[in-house]
Amino acid sequence: MTKVWLELKDETHVQFFSLYMSFFIRRKYMGTFEIIMIGIGLSMDAVAVSLSNGLGCAQISKDKIFAMPLFFGVFQGLMPFLGYYAGRLFANEIEQYSGIIILIILGFIGGKMVYDGLFSKGEEACTLLTYRLLFIQAIATSIDAFAVGVGFASMQIDIVSSVFIIGITTLILSYLALVVGKYFKSVLGSKAQVLGGIILIVIGIRAFF
């Protein structure tokens, strides 16, 4: 199990593992509680992006309110599943380039939100929030979960139930973050859009370094 812990620690940039995996490592398997905790940790980028989307656009259509957490939940569950079965073939390449990919995607989106919040009028961010963008955001925020799936392959774990729990956890938390973001958008106006853009830029910079 020590070898598994080292693999997880080395192959991801998710620092939350160091807080509680030292306890989980003493067990021969991971139970529901442990998987939920991993799901919460992995979902934090998706939560932050959902919050940012809500801050950038208060008038999000009902279909996108449903689609956004669904996209994040599906990809957050899908990536560990892919990592579990095929990750060892591509783990090094994904880890090598994931930071710059996330920085480019979230940095561009965040910069556009900051610009619109400072210099534009109306709900320009709502026109930017397309299904294609949600798809890209979902991939960018779930890359770390792929490496976690690689670590799962060395554990006594039910991968199907585990990825389901991780996906549902991300879906619920992302939806709650979106609701909170929409509320503060209605209160703060354009300042909320600037704040949302800054959040995305910070996530991108953190992923790069």
Image: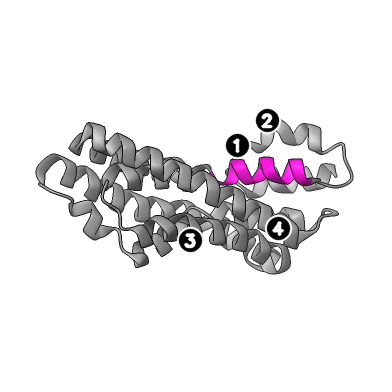
The x and y percentages for residue 113 are 24, 47
Identify which residue is drawn at 25% across, 37% down.
186
Q: Residue furthest right?
A: 28
The amino acid pointed to by label 1 is Gln
The amino acid pointed to by label 3 is Phe
Q: Give the range drawn in magenta.
A: 32-43
Residue tagged 4: 150
Disc 3, SS = helix
Residue tagged 2: 19
The x and y percentages for residue 139 are 48, 60
Disc 2, SS = helix
The x and y percentages for residue 35 are 72, 46
Disc 1, SS = loop
**Residue 201 among those drawn in magenta:** no
Q: Alpha-carbon neighbours of circle 2 within 10 Å: few (<14), some, or many (≥20)?
A: few
Q: CA separation, marks 3 and 4? A: 22 Å
Residue tagged 1: 15
Q: Residues at badges 3 and 1 in contact (C-beta under 8 Å)?
A: no
In depth, the one of 104 and 119 nearer the eye is 119
Q: Is residue 99 above or below residue 190?
A: below
Q: CA separation, marks 3 and 2? A: 28 Å
Residue tagged 3: 71
Q: Residues at badges 1 and 2 in contact (C-beta under 8 Å)?
A: yes
The x and y percentages for residue 87 are 67, 64
Q: Alpha-carbon neighbours of circle 3 within 10 Å: few (<14), some, or many (≥20)?
A: many
The amino acid pointed to by label 4 is Val
Disc 4, SS = helix
Q: CA separation, marks 3 and 1? A: 24 Å
